[in-house]
Amino acid sequence: MSVDPASAPWKPAATVAAVIERAGRFLMVEEHTSDGLRINQPAGHLDPGESLADACARETLEETAHQFTPTQLVGVYLWRSGLDAGAITYLRFAFAGTLGEALAGRALDTGIVRALWLTPDELAACADRHRSPLVMRCVDDYLRGQRYPIELLYTHPSALSAPASVTPRVPAR
């Protein structure tokens, strides 16, 4: 049974991002998108069966070849990618944490051109190439010292079991 998308409940896309600073520079990725080459934090979607912090660690490893341990929440952000009917609304959880060394020989995720370190000024100078307006907002919040305990986020054990298949939600009659 399929569900008509027009009658399906609206849901934002849950995403995570790593805000990683070393010596005044932030770890960013340059990636191919449908809008061309863009700059973003190591970031991506929450996958079934993982916590938000685990998703952020996974995405950082896949996109930068660095291990990352989220230790603090920088912020929670809501953004819509456009005004048309097909626009996607993103709910982004941004984390600060501890970055490990790069894993030699590990390939970067498909679409990622390279990982690079940028100062806040360098990042602001290329704002027209940011994947979203949340890129600079997360850095600005980090620079303002905005941090929350990671324990603010609770993952119930049931969320850590990926479902065998995703069943469309059918509205009650």
Image (spheres, rainbow, N blue to C red):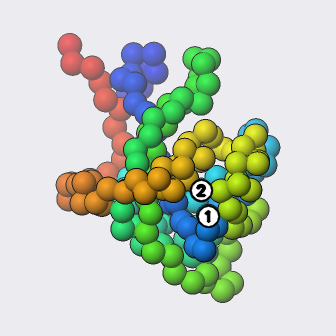
Which quadrant of the structure image shows residue 76?
Answer: top left
Residue drawn at (51%, 60%) of the image: 18
Circle 1 sits on which residue? 26
Quadrant where the image shows the N terminus: top left
Label 1: state its secondary structure: strand
Above or below, 80 relative to 7:
below
Residue positioned most to the bottom: 104
Badge 1 amino acid:
Phe
Q: Residues within 10 Å of mark 1 (few under 14, many from 20)?
A: many
Q: Is label 2 in contact with label 1 (beta carbons under 8 Å)?
A: yes
100 or 124, nearer to the observer: 124
> Can you tell which of label 2 and label 1 is closer to the viewer?
1
Mark seen at residue 60: none
Query: Can residue 76 be seen?
Result: yes
Q: Residues within 10 Å of mark 2 (few under 14, many from 20)?
A: many
166 or 160, nearer to the observer: 160
In the image: residue 44, left or right of residue 32: left
Query: Can residue 27 be seen?
Result: no
Residue positioned most to the top: 173
Above or below, 116 relative to 161:
below
Badge 2 amino acid:
Gln
Give residue 4's position: percent from left, percent from top.
44, 19
Residue drawn at (36%, 68%) of the image: 71
Which quadrant of the structure image shows residue 122?
Answer: bottom right
Give residue 27's position: percent from left, percent from top.
62, 65
Circle 2 sits on which residue? 41
